[in-house]
Amino acid sequence: MPRTSTRLTFAVLATGAGVFSMLQSLIAPALPTVQHALHTSPSTAPWVMTAYLLSASVFTPILGRVGDLTGKKRTLVAVLLTVLAGCLLAALAPSIGVLIVARVVQGVGGALFPLSFGIVRDEFAPAEVPGRIGSLSAVIAAGGGVGMVAAGPIVSALDYHWLFWIPVAVVALTALTALRCVPESRNRAEGSISWLGAGLLSAWLVALLLPLSQAGTWGWTSLRVLGLFAAAVVLFALWLYAEARSRSPLVDLRVMRLPAVWTTNTAALLFGAGMYAIWSFLPGFVQTPRQAGYGFGSSVTDAGLLMLPMLVAMFCSGVLSGRLQHVVGAKAQLTAGAALGALACGFLAAWHDQQWQVALVAGVFGFGIGLAFASMANVIVGSVPADRTGAATGMNANIRTIGGSLGTSVTSVLVTGRLQPSGLPQASGYVHGFAVLAVLCLGAALAALLVPAPRAGGRVRSAAAVPTGTDRRVPSRRA
């Protein structure tokens, strides 16, 4: 393939994944505006975020597997067109119900992550793959930061509808370019979709994530929360049983048991808890009025700008990560990234009286995010068979999301558990929350230390060592 074509392919993948990542955080700072404009209640507005989370969690591993089976390019284009439809529907939504449906449709875009990683593995020379995955991970990580920074200025200058009109234009151009320029991958698994596995996976993910996201409203000891948690345990066990017996499983449990995969997924779970919680609560902390005894009374735009060091550091370290892959390895980078997250949260728990302290913490944490994102993807991609890349990276993204839900829920309990007479959280709630996040990130660093060292050739374990059951791989163009 000509060099210009690989560059264009990468640009398409980076744009699509970056826009989806941006959509994750773009609406969060504007929720109060959306609530007022659509005349909805404070308890209903957060469903704009919850619906997106649940949809992405369900579709990410399923469509990653569909791409492995039917072709990554055609699945990528279909997903981009679906995201386009979701953004258009959201921009035109006349009510909160329609907006929530639009966010469910947008959540299908979660599959862009595993599809993009799979295409990179299939279409680029082996020596280029770590660097390209590092750069792609940097764009994905930075996309969330762009959403936090850009939301305030967009809403102030235009209105919240433009949070979706702008992605409509970008996604439409990306889908057209992908259709014309991205080659269809030759690495393809044979088999069929395990619809029983897909249904059970969807069921236990919803049963787990729904109470985690709504426990603050429903109550942790409410019948709904406890019942859904119990259902999640039962459905998870049934899913494991069904996948173990399936001739063509949606998620190959043999791949998930690889030492490099399960240790990386453990680190993803714990680091995701810290990362998503920081994204969720640090802007609120800096927007708290000073009379509460902490915070800076920042506007949404000012809070976004205070997070700008995180955005810049995420992108720079993600790009740097790929270049360091052959020098220090993905394991060292994952360990360092998680350790930097723990350092940042610990620093924030102890020192948060000045804006420069928060900006410094944001930068340190952002540098850790960039390293961790890229190295997780590189470990997974380098450890699984080529025809399982989509499903394996999709599950890694999902596990990180589950960790994010756990971290956000735990932090919410600590922050909102004790309120001042004014209704604002006590400063001690934030301090305890940041301290817990430091412990979780430290746990991620310890899990990263368990990742096996790569063998000669840079792979943690040969993909050929994992049997693929009834699936047969089409010879790769890179073979």
Image (tube, grey):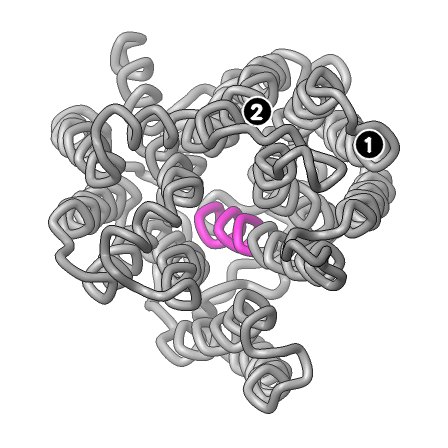
Q: Residues within 10 Å of mark 1 (few under 14, many from 20)?
A: many
Query: Which segment is the magenta one?
Result: 389-398
Residue 23 visible (yes or no) = yes
Asked if residue 215 is among those painted magenta in the image, a careful observer would answer no
Q: Residue at left 12%, top 30%? A: 176
Depth check: 235 or 247 in front? 235
Q: Which mark is residue 307?
A: 2
Residue 272's spot in the image, x, y percent?
65, 46
Residue 460, placed above or below residue 311: below
Depth check: 311 or 81 in front? 311
Residue 470's spot in the image, x, y percent?
44, 66
> How far is disc 2 from disc 1 in space, using C-alphas?
20 Å
Depth check: 132 or 275 in front? 275
Q: Residue at left 21%, top 28%? A: 158
Q: Which mark is residue 339?
A: 1
Residue 257, placed above or below residue 134: below
